[in-house]
Image: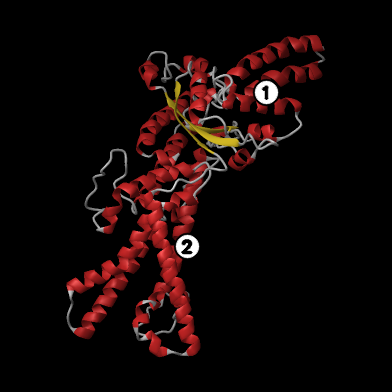
Amino acid sequence: MNGRRLLYVVAFPGILGVIFGLDATHADDFIDPAKAWLSQRAAHWANMYLPGTAPENSTCQRALQAMAASLADNSTLWAAKIVDSWAKVPDGLYSGNWALEGVYDECVGASSPDGDVWGKFCRVFVSKNRSQEGGRHEGGCGAGALDACARQQARLPPLFPTSLNLAPFKTYSTCMPDACAEHDLQESVSAALSDSSLAVRRVQCHTLHEAPEFTAGDIAFIALLGVLLALMVAASALDVYIERTRSKAIAKGGARFLLPFSIYTNLSKLFQLNTTKSSQNITCLHGIRVLSMIWVVYGHQHSATATFSANVLMAYAKTSDLLYQVISNAYFSVDSFFFLSGFLVSYVLLREVSRTGRFNVLVFYLHRIIRLLPPIALATGLFATVARLLISGPMATGWDAMRRACVVNWWKDLVFINNLYTTSAEPGIRDECIAFDLMTNSACTETRVERAEACVEREETDPLDTEALVVLRELSMADDAWDAEFPFCF
C-alpha cells in the first residue's frame, strides 16, 4: 500500500462523516483499524531508514536512542532534520519521477547540540533477490501473477508502490547517525526485505567530516602540480619584468626555455582573436569553434539532467519534434572538433610543404606527440588520482568507475593505443580512460531514452494497464544486466 492509499484509508472516513453526518463512533470503526495497521507496519518500515537491528548497547544504538529522545521532547530540530532528509515517495510516479535521493546537505549538516551525533547520508541499492529468480514464473512477479505479486509487495513500505511492481526503483536515500556503520543499515534493510522478492545489493554512506585518504599516486601528482605551478609563477614574474624593463637580451638566453610557462603571455594569446582578413587567417573557423562549444555544453547539460528528470516517461513525447533533434544529436558537435583539428593539421602541413618542398614524417609525428602527450598525461593523472577529492555529495561514488579505469588503463592513452588494445587488465573495469567519459555518457543517455520510449509506445503508458506493467517489469529485468555493466549510471 503506497502513501496516498494509506492517506485515503485514514482520512476518508472522517471526510465521509462530515459530508454524510456519520457520528464519531462509526468513523472510529474505520479509523482505528487503519491506525492499528499503520502502527504494526511502521516498526517494520523503520528498518528501511534506520539500522533497527543494531546490537544493544552499541554506539549506533545509543545514537539512535538520543535521536528518539530528541524527537520525543521536540526541544531541538537536529533529529527532525535527519528524518526530514529521508527519501520519500515523490509526486509524478507515473510520469517517471523515480529519483528517491533525499536531501544530502540537510542530512550531513544535522548534529546534536553537544556535537556527539552527526547525520550520515546513505544510498541503498536494491535489486531482485537472485535466490527467488526461479519463482518468477511460479507465483512470483511474472506477467501472469500480478495479484500474487501485489500481495507480496504490499508488505513493503510506501517507498515501493505496488502498482509499479518496483520496476524503476533501484536506489533510495536515507539518513542515520554517523555512529552507525554501512553494514548495520544493510543488515536492517535486508531484514525488512526478507519476505519480499528484493535484496540489498550495497549501501554507500557519506558524512560531512570525511578525512581524505591520500595514496602514493595522489602525492606524486600533487607534487607534479606544485612543480608546474612554481614554473608558471617564475615564468610569469620574469615575463612581466622583461616587458617592464625592456630587457630583450634576457629572453634570448636560457630564460627562453622558462618563458613558455608564462601565464601572463599565454592568457593574452588565449583570449586574442584575429579577425583580419588575409590568406593566412581563416576567420570562419572562429564561428565553427564557438557554435561547437555551445553545442557541446548544451548537449551535456541535457544529458546530465536526464538522470533525475521528473518526467522520464514523457521524454519521448517531449523530445520527438524536429527542433529537439539538434540537442539529442549533439554527438555531432564532437565531429566538428575533429573537422577543425584535421583541417588545421592538414593546412599547416600543406603550407609547410609549399614553403620547403618536403615532408618529414618523423618530425611531423614527433611534433604531434609533443603537443598532445602533456595534456593527455595531465588529464589521465588527474582522473586517476586527486579528482575524486574535488567531488562530494551523494553521487560522488559514481566517479569510482571512471577513476578505476584510469588507474588500470592510464598507459594506453600515453602510448596512443587505447583504440587498438581494448582488453582490460582487470575484469569488470572498462578498458579505457580518457575515451571512457564520452562512451559511458552516450550509453547511459541512450539506454534511458530507449526505456522511456518503450514505455511510452506501449498502450499510452497507462500505469494501471496490465501490458504496461509487463513492460515496466521487462525494463527492470534489463536494468539488472545494465547495472552490472554500468553501475555508475545510477
Residue type pointed to by label 2: Ile
Residue situated in front as seen by the camera: 51 or 444: 51
Disc 1: CA contacts within 10 A as few (<14), some (14-19) or many (>=20): few
Q: Does 403 sit above or below residue 19?
A: below
Q: Which residue is painted at 75% across and 29% down in the image? A: 74
- Residue 35, given in percent of the width and then of the height, sits at 69, 15
Disc 2: CA contacts within 10 A as few (<14), some (14-19) or many (>=20): few
- Location of mark 2 (residue): 294
- Residue 330, given in percent of the width and then of the height, sits at 42, 56
Residue situated in front as seen by the camera: 430 or 138: 430
Q: Is residue 287 visible?
A: no
- What distance separates the C-alpha of mark 1 from that of mark 2? 47 Å
Mark 1 vs 2, N-terminal side: 1
- Location of mark 1 (residue): 7
Mark linked to residue 354: none
- Residue 46, given in percent of the width and then of the height, sits at 59, 23
Q: Are marks 1 and 2 in contact (CB under 8 Å)?
A: no
Quadrant, the N terminus: top right
Q: Secondary structure at mark 2?
A: helix
Q: Is residue 264 visible?
A: yes
Residue type pointed to by label 1: Leu
Query: In the shown orientation, is residue 290 left or right of residue 482?
Result: right
Q: Does 10 sit above or below residue 106?
A: above
Splitting the image into 4 quarters, where does residue 259 fall?
bottom left
- Residue 113, given in percent of the width and then of the height, sits at 70, 37
Q: Secondary structure at mark 1?
A: helix
Residue situated in front as seen by the camera: 324 or 239: 239
Q: Which residue is painted at 42% across and 58% down in the image? A: 222
Query: In the shown orientation, is residue 153 left or right of residue 399?
Result: right
Quadrant, the C terminus: top left
